Image (cartoon, rainbow, N blue to C red):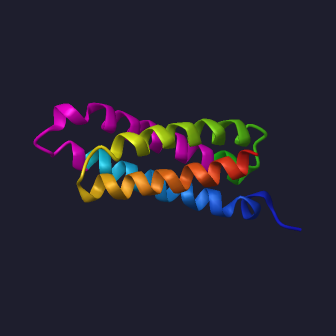
Amino acid sequence: MKKLHEIYQSCIEACFKCATECEHCATACLTEADVQNRQKCIQLCLDCVQLCLSSSQLMARGSTYSKALCQLCADVCDACATECARFEDDHCKRCAEACRQCATECRKMAS
């Protein structure tokens, strides 16, 4: 019989990838010339990092709150992807893609 962390492995991996890309994106955005225009992007990336890491931790331990947190994570990932897509640089593009993939995986897990 599979353990919960094995059942949720694709979602856990998507959350870790998203957290990594969001952390990189927020840091890179801080060095951009138009950093003032990226405040919402940076904030969403940081929120996304926290939710992705928390979601993966709850899934790994089989928490009964995993589904609820994953639903919230998916919503924030969608918002982050939308915001990052406004910018043309590679770090924002990679972040938006990772956020979209994570949102998809989190919604599958939460359903």
Which residue appears at 34% of the width and 47% of the height?
85
Using the image as rendered, state which of residue 9 and residue 100 is in the foreground.
Answer: 100
Q: Report the side of 65 relative to 101 (left or right).
A: right
Residue 103 position within the rendered picture, expressed as x and y whole percent measured from the top left: 57, 48
Quadrant including the N terminus: bottom right
| Residue 37 falls inside the magenta stretch | yes
- What residue is rendered at 31% in x and 38% in y? 42
Q: Which residues are magenta?
A: 28-56
Q: Is residue 36 above or below residue 52?
A: above
- Secondary structure mostly seen in magenta is helix
Identify the image quadrant of residue 80.
top left
Determine the residue positioned at 36% across, 39% down. Answer: 83
Indicate the position of residue 26 as horizontal and vertical percent values: 30, 44
Image height of 68 relative to 99, above or below: above
Left/right of residue 11 with respect to residue 86 in the rendered view: right
Residue placed furthest toward the bottom: 1
